């Protein structure tokens, strides 16, 4: 009997997955497929091969609704991975994503229905966590995402295509939210009154970072832009092995990457925890992430960037709450959801986390200033 392989938002027959797999230059032969990970965008399968000495693979059906310029996105990933691999050969640290090309040497495959597919070598061991299992991992996460920005400093920004323009622009996201409110296409605004109120009462505080960016006071760098904790793979000893999900690598702010790491790592519960009482803002994790991130970035971050790191956590938590709420009101057209009000639950979790971050703002600020000073002193001694 045909087995249906379901990955978040997509059902595929095993035979169809196998025929897509066979379009790529894999060095092993197909054994089986299973759904992988909890990403909200693509449909992802782990393809196991029969041979013990050959790698397994990650096969993804690309979400074209979210990433219409597929060719440009894949070209970005090729440039970024090539650039980083060259660097890592020198300092010999973590792994990098490896694109497996098709038998006609393309970085993606288009099937008869117009779906886009790509394949990566499966990084093994490569464990991803939705909730941080311990505080030690937080230091590794900060370091890995800091190193990522550091490695890309000498890649010219104009070589990277802005795949989703204004991705983290608060003005743009607020505009989309207001349009959704006005249209209210599935009559959901009445069920989200409190959350909508929260957005309106906090939006002006969230304009500090965009204002400084518009005034040219924050440097635009090539950043990852999706540094949630499950986009980093770890080994069994809690060492970071590879930063993944490079689709959104684009010109951006260092604050987005630090902020999103904190949003996901320093939350004691899941991004969609329905019992908001379980959500705490974990300050020791904030500190460990900051230690790792600043260790890798203090030599080039500007004083304005360092100063805004504590606020960046609120910025990214707020913008994600806003995006989940907009998607809820729009009828769940963007993020994959598992139940009816999933996006509203995600939004509530972000609001709860944001409130806790506001309460601990002064503590988090002290941590950043002390950590930055510690590394600056070390640098001067060298
Ligand atoms: P999405 O954009 O949907 O989040 P990702 O590229 O992050 O898609 O992949 C989803 C999940 O698949 C990841 O969280 C991770 O668990 C797993 N994954 C992706 N790429 C690899 C890889 N090269 N090696 C091992 N696991 C991977
Ligand atoms: C999406 O692809 P994934 O699941 O890693 C989203 C991010 C959000 C995240 C929230 C392209 O990331 O911006 O922060 O969900 N990616 C895109 O979990 O919109
Ligand atoms: Mg992901």
Image: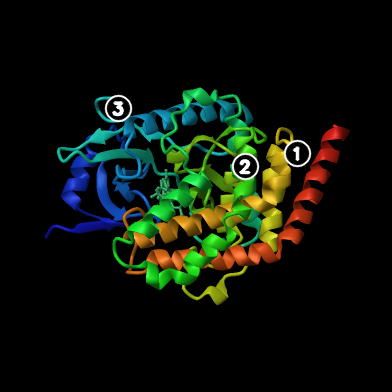
Q: Nearer the viewer, residue 25 or 382?
A: 382
Q: Quadrant of the C terminus?
A: top right
Q: Nearer the viewer, residue 376 or 221?
A: 221
Figure coloring: rainbow
State how far apart marks 3 and 1 are (Cα).
Answer: 43 Å
- Secondary structure of the residue carrying tag 3 is loop
Work out whether residue 345 can be spotted: yes
- Secondary structure of the residue carrying tag 1 is helix
Residue at x-position 79% and y-position 49%: 369
Please tell me how crowded label 1 is: few (under 14), some (14-19), or many (20+) other residues with Cα within 10 Å: few
Q: Quadrant of residue 269?
A: bottom right
Q: Is mark 2 within 8 Å of ligand 2?
A: no
Evaluate if marks 1 and 2 touch, with contact meaning CB atoms under 8 Å apart.
no
| Disc sitting over residue 157 in the figure | none
- Secondary structure of the residue carrying tag 2 is helix
Q: Which residue is mark 3?
A: 106
Looking at the image, residue 88 lies above or below residue 228? above
Q: Which residue is mark 1?
A: 303
Work out whether residue 282 can be spotted: no
| Disc sitting over residue 211 in the figure | 2
Query: Closer to the camera: disc 3 or disc 1?
Result: 1
Q: At which x and y percent is residue 30?
A: 25, 44
Residue at x-position 43% and y-position 32%: 77
Query: Closer to the camera: disc 1 or disc 2?
Result: 2
State how far apart marks 1 and 2 are (Cα).
Answer: 16 Å
Q: At which x and y percent is residue 97?
A: 45, 37
Residue at x-position 83% and y-position 45%: 374
Please tell me how crowded label 2 is: few (under 14), some (14-19), or many (20+) other residues with Cα within 10 Å: few
Q: At which x and y percent is residue 276?
A: 53, 73
State how far apart marks 3 and 2 are (Cα).
Answer: 41 Å
Looking at the image, residue 95 lies above or below residue 140? above
């Amino acid at each position: 009997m045909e087995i249906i392989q379901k990955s978040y938002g997509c059902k595929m027959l095993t035979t169809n997955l196998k025929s897509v797999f066979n379009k790529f230059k894999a060095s092993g032969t197909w054994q089986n497929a299973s759904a992988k990970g909890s990403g909200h965008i693509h449909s992802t399968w782990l393809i196991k091969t029969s041979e013990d000495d050959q790698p397994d693979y990650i096969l993804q059906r690309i979400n074209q609704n979210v990433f219409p310029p597929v060719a440009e996105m894949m070209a970005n990933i090729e440039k970024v991975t090539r650039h980083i691999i060259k660097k890592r050969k020198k300092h010999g640290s973590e792994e990098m994503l490896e694109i497996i090309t098709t038998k006609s040497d393309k970085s993606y495959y288009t099937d008869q229905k117009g779906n886009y597919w790509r394949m990566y070598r499966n990084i093994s061991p490569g464990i991803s966590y939705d909730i941080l299992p311990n505080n030690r991992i937080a230091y590794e996460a900060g370091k890995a995402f800091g190193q990522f920005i550091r490695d890309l400093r000498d890649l010219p920004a104009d070589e990277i295509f802005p795949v989703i323009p204004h991705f983290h622009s608060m003005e743009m996201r607020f505009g989309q939210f207001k349009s959704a409110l006005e249209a209210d296409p599935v009559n959901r605004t009445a069920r989200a009154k409190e959350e909508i109120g929260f957005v309106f009462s906090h939006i002006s505080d969230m304009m500090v970072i965009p204002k400084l960016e518009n005034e040219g006071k924050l440097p635009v760098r090539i950043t990852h832009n999706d540094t949630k904790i499950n986009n980093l793979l770890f080994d069994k000893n809690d060492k970071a092995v590879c930063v993944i999900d490079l689709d959104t690598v684009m010109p951006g702010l260092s604050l987005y990457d630090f902020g999103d790491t904190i949003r996901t790592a320093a939350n004691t519960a899941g991004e969609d925890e329905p019992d908001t009482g379980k959500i705490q803002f974990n300050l020791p994790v904030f500190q460990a992430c900051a230690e790792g991130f600043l260790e890798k970035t203090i030599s080039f971050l500007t004083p304005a960037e360092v100063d805004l790191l504590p606020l960046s956590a609120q910025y990214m938590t707020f913008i994600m709450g806003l995006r989940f709420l907009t998607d809820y009101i729009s009828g769940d057209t963007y993020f994959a959801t598992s139940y009816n009000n999933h996006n509203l639950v995600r939004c509530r979790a972000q609001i709860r986390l944001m409130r806790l971050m506001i309460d601990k703002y002064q503590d988090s600020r002290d941590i950043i200033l002390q950590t930055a000073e510690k590394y600056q002193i070390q640098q001067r001694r060298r």
